[in-house]
Image (cartoon, rainbow, N blue to C red):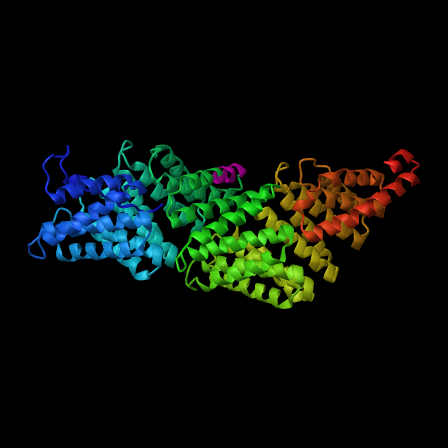
């Protein structure tokens, strides 16, 4: 949630009701305070007039440089420039704001009643400049200024906002440098701020939102499930408390959506990602006309749609995601600190579209975009491992299409570097290990190097060892470990690996509820592992188990046809080996699925595979029906 100057008002030092006879400076303060509260583009003309009025006041004051009234004029002129920056995002206004506030703070005395407000507003302007230009010195000074403001505001009714602002700066510095002490202190200060405010405090929703943001940020680094649960709850409360006409409600909706998306990634509850999409969609509808605000909302909606794709066959989400991320990049100025993030998400959406539709231009462009994102991210940034993973994944996707050894070699190197940069207690370390294992399996398919498949098994096992038992990705990682063990067993015909592969597939299936979108594919994978072991030991119990699992996968009517059809093929293959009585039923099942295949949603290679297989199935089914003298079935 973006820190706004509205947290510290001028109204504490203005008479209420508003007097009729006012000098020009006092009149400007009242008008500035009203604009600060509304912060609408419609107020721009009035704000321009107030800035001009304050500049005239500063020029007319024939008083010493350190005169309290003159310093107050300069401090409020700084507020005016910052408000105009918030509306137009002209960095020159922010530079002027910092300049005027510095003069007031540096020349003023700590005894001035407005000094803690000047310090806070200077910290706020430095924070905003850091967010736009990324200069490390600005976030360090912002923390110092907020700390000084908190120290001077003992007993002041706005101390809660000053504590919350200090927490925001520390939380942001943690995201940039990764010092755990910063995020822990941020949450401590923001919790104290929340505790200072009664339930009926007018702006309590602002404080709850900032605390919720810091808890989500700490969760993303350390993985404590309690943090993300609290974060989502605080954001839900904040959204309910936010006035409908408030211009910052868009930011609050974005933050709630982000917490729900993070909770979905941790626990796998589909309702969380559905709600995240809806909140992010609402934020886009409400977002301000400023480029960065709009870009941030578009980026988050695109990111949540990519999460929804895991459980949806709606291929429109793919194109929509690309369009949203491209729009975010187009709105973001070159050199802005958000640009690497926006580029990375655009690149990932292009990779997803390439995998589904096979457009070569998408994968080449995705790699170029990810390379720029990595190049513009400092090595010490906490975001670096994730961006290396994404670039590696894009190179791996291109390798799987064109089989260039250079691509998979570079992909493995990037994934390894990401693993090396991630501490063991980082919640994404298991995911990075898993991605490295997947890249090694891809290289093994090309090189047949036993070292690659051995190391892949090790990486998958390490990912499982580091992940909590209730992690939503654990079944998928078990499944992939089973695949890797199965590949290694074929290399050495090692009975132990065959057994371990089946064990992992069984565990993955046991952890997957029957209504889960991947339940059918896990049945099929278990069936395939039984079939592989049968090919080595000719144990009839294995071929029977293979038929049982593959047939169960193929006959789940609610499962994706793109899974059911290969499962039906597996059923046919297993049943044909022993002329099982279910063979004709397997053919009938496969043929019944064909009309439901979403051809436009399949990759080019999958379309060719299915078309080739369909003709063969139809011929074989007819032949089998004739052999069984079921001529009506043969005609069908």
Q: Is residue 229 visible?
A: no
Residue 223 located left or right of residue 93: right
**In the displayed structure, would residue 184 be above or below residue 404?**
above
Seen at 58% across and 51% down, the residue is 352
Nearer to us in this view, 478 or 257: 257
Residue found 71% across the figure and 45% down from its top: 524
Residue with the most extreme bottom position: 406
Q: Position of residue 226 (x, y in %)?
A: 43, 42
Q: Quadrant of residue 43?
A: top left
Across and down, in percent, residue 14 comes to: 14, 39
Residue sitting at 51 percent across and 59 percent down? Answer: 369
- Tell me if I can see residue 591 in this picture: yes
The residue nearer to you, when weighing 48 against 631, is 48
Residue at the (83%, 41%) spot, across then down? 583
In the image, is 309 to the left or to the right of 187? right
Q: Quadrant of the N terminus?
A: top left
Q: Which of 99/115 is in front?
A: 99
Q: Position of residue 466 (x, y in %)?
A: 52, 53
* Above or below, 482 relative to 192: below
Q: What stretch of residues is rendered in magenta?
A: 270-277
Quarter that holds the C terminus: top right
């Amino acid at each position: 949630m973006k820190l706004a100057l509205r947290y510290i008002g001028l109204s504490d030092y203005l008479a209420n009701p508003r007097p009729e006879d006012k000098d020009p400076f006092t009149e400007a303060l009242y008008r500035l305070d009203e604009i600060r509260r509304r912060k609408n583009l419609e107020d721009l003309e009035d704000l321009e007039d107030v800035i001009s009025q304050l500049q005239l006041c500063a020029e007319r004051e024939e008083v010493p440089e350190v005169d309290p009234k003159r310093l107050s004029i300069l401090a409020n002129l700084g507020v005016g420039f910052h408000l105009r920056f918030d509306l137009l995002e002209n960095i020159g206004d922010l530079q002027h704001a910092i300049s005027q506030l510095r003069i007031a703070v540096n020349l003023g005395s700590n005894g001035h009643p407005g000094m803690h407000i000047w310090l806070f507003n200077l910290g706020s302007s430095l924070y905003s400049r850091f967010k736009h230009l990324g200069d490390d010195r600005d976030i360090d000074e912002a923390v110092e200024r907020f700390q000084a403001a908190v120290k001077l505001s003992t007993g002041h009714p706005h101390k809660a906002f000053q504590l919350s602002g200090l927490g925001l700066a520390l939380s942001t510095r943690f995201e940039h440098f990764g010092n755990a002490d910063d995020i822990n202190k941020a949450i401590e200060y923001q919790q104290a701020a929340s505790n200072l405010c009664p339930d009926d405090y007018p702006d309590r929703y602002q404080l709850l939102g900032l605390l919720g943001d810091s808890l989500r940020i700490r969760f993303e680094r350390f993985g404590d499930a309690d943090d993300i649960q609290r974060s989502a709850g605080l954001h839900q409360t904040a959204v309910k408390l936010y006035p409908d006409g408030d211009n910052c409600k868009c930011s609050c909706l974005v933050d709630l959506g982000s917490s729900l998306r993070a909770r979905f990634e941790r626990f796998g509850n589909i309702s969380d990602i559905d709600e995240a999409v809806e909140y992010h969609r609402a934020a886009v509808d409400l977002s301000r006309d400023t480029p960065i605000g709009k870009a941030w909302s578009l980026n988050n909606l695109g990111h949540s749609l990519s999460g929804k794709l895991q459980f949806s066959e709606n291929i429109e989400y793919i194109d929509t995601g690309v369009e949203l991320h491209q729009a975010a990049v187009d709105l973001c100025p070159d050199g802005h600190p958000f640009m690497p993030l926006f580029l990375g998400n655009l690149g990932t959406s292009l990779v997803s579209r390439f995998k589904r539709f096979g457009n070569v231009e998408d994968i080449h462009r995705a790699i170029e975009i990810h390379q720029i994102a990595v190049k513009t991210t400092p090595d010490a940034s906490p975001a670096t491992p994730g961006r290396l993973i994404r670039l590696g994944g894009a190179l791996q996707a291109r390798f799987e299409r064109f089989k260039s050894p250079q691509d998979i070699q570079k992909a493995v190197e990037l994934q390894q570097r990401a693993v090396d940069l991630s501490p063991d207690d980082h919640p994404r370390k298991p995911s990075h290990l898993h991605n490295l294992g997947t890249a090694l399996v891809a290289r093994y398919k090309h090189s047949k190097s036993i070292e690659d498949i051995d190391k892949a098994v090790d990486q998958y096992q390490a990912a499982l060892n580091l992940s909590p038992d209730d992690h939503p990705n654990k079944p998928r990682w078990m499944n992939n470990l089973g695949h890797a063990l199965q590949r290694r067993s074929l290399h050495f015909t090692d009975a132990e690996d065959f057994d371990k592969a089946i064990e992992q597939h069984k565990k993955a299936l046991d952890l997957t509820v029957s209504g889960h979108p991947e339940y059918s594919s896990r049945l099929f994978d278990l069936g395939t592992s039984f079939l592989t072991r049968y090919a080595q030991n000719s144990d009839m119990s294995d071929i029977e188990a293979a038929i049982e699992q593959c047939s169960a996968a193929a006959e789940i009517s609610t499962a994706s046809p793109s899974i059911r059809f290969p499962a039906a093929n597996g059923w046919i293959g297993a049943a044909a080996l022993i002329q099982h009585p279910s063979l004709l039923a397997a053919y009938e099942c496969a043929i019944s699925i064909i009309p439901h295949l979403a051809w436009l949603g399949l990759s080019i290679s999958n379309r060719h595979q299915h078309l080739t297989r369909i003709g063969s199935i139809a011929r074989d089914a007819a032949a089998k029906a004739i052999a069984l003298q079921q001529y009506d079935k043969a005609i069908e």
